[in-house]
């Protein structure tokens, strides 16, 4: 691994010189390190660049690390990773990504992840994205996530992108079986001329399945964000979509949540709120000794926690 990779790993996956358990480190489109464990097997795919991660039934308490790093311009890294999670497993997957360029050339990572959770499986999926480096080269991250959840399976997605990514197009699709649950918490901050698009589509096919989708974003500078979500209730189910955004400077946010009920027993709701930071919040913090700029940053930090 080169030094830039090590710095990215520290930022996106809490790297401290090594990983415990199963891991796969991707650097500029190639494998820079890999290890399987007794219960987690990582192997190359036969048909596409990427890996298959197979988690044995009943696996408990393990963390799987699959960070990806692009450390220079003129790299367009596309990878296909499939996760097969056995019945009753309960694991954490850390899949951070960082893109770095300072040579004037564009750099991009496009991670296409598919999750297949068997009955009673539970996964906490953590994904942090950053862009680093100076110069005119664009830093792009375009993740695609697809999940198929079996009976009583639970997938919790905690995703965050708070700095440096010039353009991102984030697509997530879920298909849920009986009593399956999908929980998503997304946080995005854009600044300058950055652009971010988020598109969620969830099909609640199984009886008593449910999704809870919460997106919080801040658009600063001249940045622009677009958020769309679609929840389709095909059975007795519950669906909730919430999009909250803060505007600062000349930032723009477009929010388009939608619901589609195909069963009279589908209980679906969406919320969307866009606005600026309230003046009284800033004044209150200023009375405690903060400058206006420090007060705004404090409020934004708390909002995106």
Image: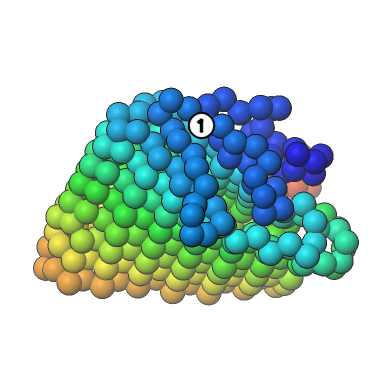
Would you say residue 282 is visible in this rendering?
A: no
Q: Seen in the image, is 187 located left or right of residue 155?
A: right
State the quadrant of the C terminus: top right
Residue 125: x %, y % from top left: 46, 43
Residue located 14% across and 55% down the image: 207
Residue located 20% across and 46% down the image: 151
Residue 205: x %, y % from top left: 20, 61
Q: Residues within 10 Å of mark 1 (few under 14, many from 20)?
A: some
When the figure is inspected, residue 229 is found, relative to residue 85, above or below; the finding is below
When the figure is inspected, residue 216 is found, relative to residue 305, above or below; the finding is below
Q: Seen in the image, is 285 located left or right of residue 185?
A: right
Residue located 31% across and 54% down the image: 148
Would you say residue 204 is visible in this rendering?
A: yes
**Residue in the foreground of this view, choosing between 212 and 132:** 132
**Residue in the foreground of this view, choosing between 184 and 146:** 146
Could you say whether the residue bearing mark 1 is in a helix, strand or loop? loop
When the figure is inspected, residue 142 is found, relative to residue 62, above or below; the finding is below
**Residue in the foreground of this view, choosing between 80 and 215:** 80
Q: Seen in the image, is 258 located left or right of residue 48?
A: left
Residue 245: x %, y % from top left: 54, 62
Residue 192: x %, y % from top left: 75, 66
Q: Seen in the image, is 51 located left or right of residue 190?
A: left
Look at mark 1 in the image and give the residue it sits on.
Answer: 36
């Amino acid at each position: 691994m080169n030094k830039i990779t090590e710095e990215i790993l520290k930022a996106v996956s809490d790297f401290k010189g090594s990983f415990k358990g199963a891991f796969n480190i991707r650097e500029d489109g190639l494998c820079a390190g890999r290890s399987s464990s007794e219960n987690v097997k990582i192997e190359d795919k036969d048909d596409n660049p990427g890996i298959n991660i197979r988690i044995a039934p009943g696996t408990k308490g393990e963390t799987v690390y699959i960070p990806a790093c692009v450390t220079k311009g003129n790299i367009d890294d596309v990878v296909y990773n499939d996760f097969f999670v056995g019945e009753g497993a309960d694991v954490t997957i850390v899949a951070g990504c960082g893109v770095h360029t300072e040579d004037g050339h564009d750099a991009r990572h496009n991670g296409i992840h598919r999750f297949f959770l068997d009955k009673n499986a539970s996964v906490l999926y953590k994904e942090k994205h950053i862009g680093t480096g100076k110069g005119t080269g664009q830093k792009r991250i375009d993740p695609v996530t697809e999940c198929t959840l079996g009976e009583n399976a639970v997938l919790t997605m905690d995703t965050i992108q708070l700095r440096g990514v010039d353009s991102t197009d984030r697509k997530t699709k879920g298909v849920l079986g009986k009593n399956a649950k999908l929980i998503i918490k997304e946080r995005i901050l854009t600044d300058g001329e950055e652009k971010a698009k988020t598109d969620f589509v969830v099909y609640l096919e199984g009886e008593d399945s449910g999704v809870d989708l919460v997106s919080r974003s801040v658009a600063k500078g001249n940045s622009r964000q677009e958020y769309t979500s679609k929840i389709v209730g095909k059975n007795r189910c519950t669906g909730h979509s919430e999009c909250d955004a803060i505007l600062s400077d000349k930032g723009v946010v477009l929010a388009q949540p939608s619901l589609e009920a195909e069963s009279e027993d589908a209980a679906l709701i969406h919320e969307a709120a866009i606005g600026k930071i309230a003046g009284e919040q800033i004044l209150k913090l200023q009375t405690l000794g903060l400058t206006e700029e420090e007060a705004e940053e404090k409020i934004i930090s708390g909002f995106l926690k």
